[in-house]
Image (cartoon, rainbow, N blue to C red):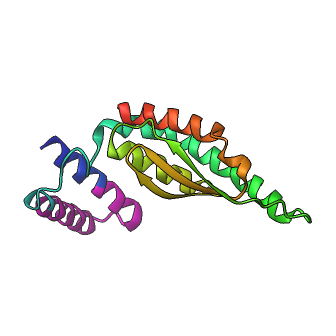
Amino acid sequence: MLRALGLGAVLFGFWLLLSGHYTPLLLGLGVASCVLVVYIAMRMEVVDHESFPMHVGARVVLYLPWLLMEIAKSNVRVARIVLDPALPIDPGIGRLRLRQRTALGKVIFANSVTLTPGTITTGVQGDEIEIHALTRADLDGGEEGEMSRRVSWVEAG
C-alpha cells in the first residue's frame, strides 16, 4: 500500500509539473486520473519493489548530479575528438564485470553508460556488460569503475 501511495504522489507531482494549471477543477481531475492509474496498476499487480523502487529514491537524488557532471565532461571530450583535424577515433568493444547484484542496479549502470557520450551499452549478459566506446582508452574501466561503485551504492538503498 505504501508503494501505491508513493506512486500516486509521484504521478500527481509529474502531472502538476507538466500541467502548470492550479485551478480546483483541474487539480481535482489530476487527482482523479492519478487515483485511476494507481488503481489500474494495483489490479494489474505491477506495483512492486521493481516497478516503483522506493528504496533507492534518496540515493538516486545524490547520484544524478554526479552523473550529469560526467555527461557534461564526456560531451566536451567527444567534441574535442570530433573537432580535432586528425580525428583520433579508435572505436572498440570491451566487456566489464558487473558489481551490481540486482536487475535494477544493472539497468541503472547500463543506462548510465549509454547516457555518457562516447559509450554505448550493447549488451548485458549475466554478470558482464558489453560496451562500445568511441576510443579504446575509454574501455580501460577507470570511469566505469567509479560509476559502478556509485551505482552499487545506489542499489544498496
Residue 7, magenta (yes or no):
no
In this image, 113 relative to 2: left or right?
Answer: right
**Residue farthest to the right?**
85
Q: Determine the residue positioned at 55% across, 48% down.
A: 95
State whether residue 156 is above or below residue 138. Answer: above
Viewer-proximal residue among 4 and 128:
128
Quarter of the picture containing the N terminus is top left
Name the spot of residue 72 as percent of width and height, x first. Answer: 68, 51
Quarter of the picture containing the C terminus is top left
State whether residue 107 is above or below residue 79. Answer: above
* Residue 73 appears in view: no
Q: What is the span of residues highlighted in magenta in the rendered image? A: 11-40
* Residue 72 appears in view: yes
Viewer-proximal residue among 21 and 18:
18
Q: Main secondary structure of the magenta part?
A: helix
Viewer-proximal residue among 34 and 87:
87
State whether residue 155 is above or below residue 135. Answer: above
In this image, 116 relative to 84: left or right?
Answer: left
Name the spot of residue 34 as percent of width and height, x first. Answer: 21, 61
